[in-house]
Amino acid sequence: MKGKIQSTLHKNISKIITVVCLTVFIYASYSLLNIFLNYYQNQNVMNDVQDAYYHESSRSVASAQKVKQDSHENSNSIRSGFDELLNQNEQVVGWITIEDTEIDYPILQSDNNIDFLTEDFNGNESIAGSIFLDYRNDIASSDQNVVVYGHRMKDGSMFQHLTKFLDEDFFESHKTFTFDTLYDSYEAEIFAVYNTLIDFNYIRTDFANDEEYDQLLSEIQDKSIYQTNTELSVDDQMLTLSTCEYTLDPNDSRLVIHAKLVKQ
């Protein structure tokens, strides 16, 4: 009798373990499927946005001279290449392109630095979020530090490929990239790459005077893993690219790239 009870108990425990394992497997499978689906949806959204942007940009080439004349007459006129994107999303403020990476994205801006952590170009929830400008920046002005954020996604999207700049050979062959805003086009000349904790205030956008800005530039250059010949002064406008980094701290570490903006 005792042996029969033990046998029944073992069978019940075995069934419970099987059910638990199966439940964990189903949940894990669902989570992975959801992640891959999110990646797929994000890629489709970006493909559509890129098609719209480059189609509009190619159309703009025919009227480039007129745009150039208009920009001289009105420095605050929106460049025609952004017309279609603005029709789709009025929060578009620019575009960033880095050769030999997946980084070829619109830049959005909200009135906070939270929304676009989990929101895609179409306003839908997304684990990839969007590439976005710090809410404190004014894209129409000449802020000394223009700060842009993005996630590092495991499928290589968003700002994941900023990690390529940790390779010196890649850095040496990709020292510049393109940064466009609604109003101007820039060549961004990289002068610093480093990992840091968030207690270093590299995302500061407001400076009491030129001395404070100059101090930040010096601290940034000291932190950089590379030394460049880029000439910097307080009159230069800096672009800061920021994404997550996990070697220094799983939560409070960042990979940062700074570039000098040169208007084209």
Image (cartoon, grey):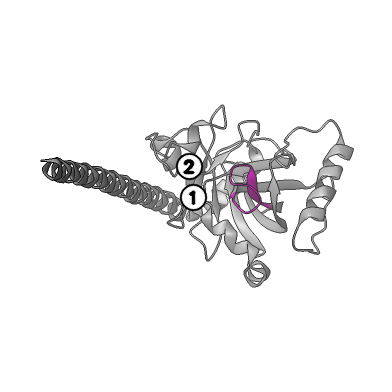
Q: Is residue 205 left or right of residue 157?
A: right
The residue sitting at the right extreme is 211
Residue span colored magenta: 245-257
Nearer the N terminus, badge 1 or badge 2?
1
Mark 1 lies on residue: 105
Q: Position of residue 248 (x, y in %)?
A: 66, 51
Q: Nearer the viewer, residue 104 or 70?
A: 104
Which mark, residue 41? none
Which image quadrant is residue 264 in?
Answer: bottom right
Contact? badges 1 and 2 (CB < 8 Å) = yes
- Which residue appears at 63% of the width and 42% of the height? 252
Within 10 Å of disc 2 (Cα), the crowding (few <14, some 14-19, many 20+) is many
Q: Position of residue 25 (x, y in %)?
A: 27, 48
Q: Position of residue 123 (x, y in %)?
A: 40, 34
Q: Position of residue 89 (x, y in %)?
A: 43, 35
What amino acid type is highlighted by mark number 2?
A: Ser
What amino acid type is highlighted by mark number 1?
A: Tyr
- Which residue appears at 49% of the width and 31% of the height? 115
Q: Nearer the viewer, residue 139 or 18?
A: 18
How far, Cα to Cα, is label 1 from label 2? 9 Å
Q: Is residue 229 left or right of residue 102?
A: right
Viewer-nearest of discs 1 and 2? 2
Q: Is residue 88 left or right of residue 16?
A: right
Which image quadrant is residue 167 in?
Answer: bottom right
- Which residue appears at 58% of the width and 43% of the height? 149
Within 10 Å of disc 1 (Cα), the crowding (few <14, some 14-19, many 20+) is many
Is the residue 167 above or below the residue 85 in the image? below
Which mark, residue 130? 2
